[in-house]
Image: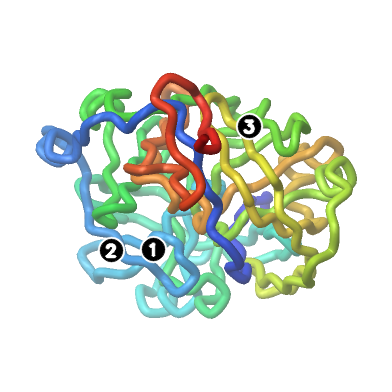
Amino acid sequence: MGYPFLATAATVLATSTPIVEAPQTPSPEFADEIGNAEGTATVDGTTDSHLRMTVPVTIEGEGPFQFMIDTGAQATAVTRDLSDRLELEPIGEAMVVGMASRARVDMVELDGLEFATRTLDDLEVPLLEGRHIGADGILGLDSLQDMRVLIDFRDETIAVNDAKALGGNRGYEIVVRARRKLGRLIITRAQIDGITTAVVVDTGAQNSIGNLALQRKMRARNLDTIHNTDVNGKALVGTLDFARTVRIEGMTLNNLPIVFADGPAFRSLGLDKRPAMILGMHDLRVFDRVAIDFSSKKILFDMPAGAGYRRKMRFNEFASRLKEPG
């Protein structure tokens, strides 16, 4: 009998870029130090058609294949086409929980997965259809646990190592402690329009998705109807509105588009009864870097130079918020 995997990758229409308010001026860059750290698994990343980050991997010397980094997926997964090509051994079935559906799929055993300087063996991975994920596979939490994943959106690179080797917390204006649940890191006390909300940072989701509890609390409008497709190929219909403010520790995102929808992924995480949101890649890309540290249960944000600047706004170095001039 199979067991459930949560894979939250979803395709969502991009609508708007949020404005970021920085709590202080950005710190110096540490990219050169990180790139030279001994043993750091650093690879060039490419961007798929849905703004998510994919990286090259090899499997038992074959490849490279493009795998999506998904911090919202419990397990690494491969496509059925790739499994057939590599003649992977079937071992049973699994239940895959997507944003819109639950589906029973075949599982295979995977050895010799090489991602930068790491080699992983004895992985039990579900099979997905390539047309539903836009890549050859997914690197999930079973490949990323006890490490820090550093995504540098400026250079389009991903680095995997321990926190010290990746420069520690230097250069990050915001360091957020999170709670671990089913492998993922959840920010439990974000504020969305003043509503305490659990936030999951999910590199496998294109845009940000809110649950129905958050929609009710926000009294969200239905500005548009958005159609999503999850990793199982099932459609999820949601409604679009914008959050005026999303506050996480000392930073604020303004004008954040959120697609509100009901789906089994929130229920699997126990986040269907309280306001919750999945923060996707379209909105993470407003930062220069995002580090997800599974070992210390921290998420770190590097603010971009000039964060929050707009024509009618300026940054006040003596305050922790942007202020109107004059």
Mark 2 surroundings within 10 Å by alpha-carbon count, few (fewer than 14), some (14 through 19), many (20 or more) = some
Mark 1 surroundings within 10 Å by alpha-carbon count, few (fewer than 14), some (14 through 19), many (20 or more) = many
Look at the picture and state if 14 lies above or below 138.
below
Mark 3 surroundings within 10 Å by alpha-carbon count, few (fewer than 14), some (14 through 19), many (20 or more) = few
Look at the picture and state if 111 lies above or below 29.
below
**Which numbered disc, 1 or 3, marks the residue that appears first in the sequence?**
1
**Which numbered disc, 2 or 1, marks the residue that appears first in the sequence?**
2
Q: Compute the Cα span from label 2 to label 3.
A: 28 Å
Indicate the amino acid at tag 2.
Answer: Pro
Indicate the amino acid at tag 1.
Answer: Phe
**Which numbered disc, 2 or 3, marks the residue that appears first in the sequence?**
2
Q: Compute the Cα span from label 1 to label 3.
A: 24 Å
Task: Measuring from the top left, give residue 46's x and y in whole percent.
Answer: 31, 65
Quadrant position of residue 301: top left
Nearest to the observer: residue 138 or residue 23: 23
Indicate the amino acid at tag 3.
Answer: Lys
Using the image, tell me which numbered label, if any, was put on residue 67. Answer: 1
Q: Which residue is mark 3?
A: 181
Identify the residue at horizontal 66%, vertical 40% (top origin). 245
Asked if marks 2 and 1 touch (Cβ < 8 Å), the reply is yes
Identify the residue at horizontal 57%, vertical 74% (top origin). 132
Identify the residue at horizontal 66%, vertical 72% (top origin). 229
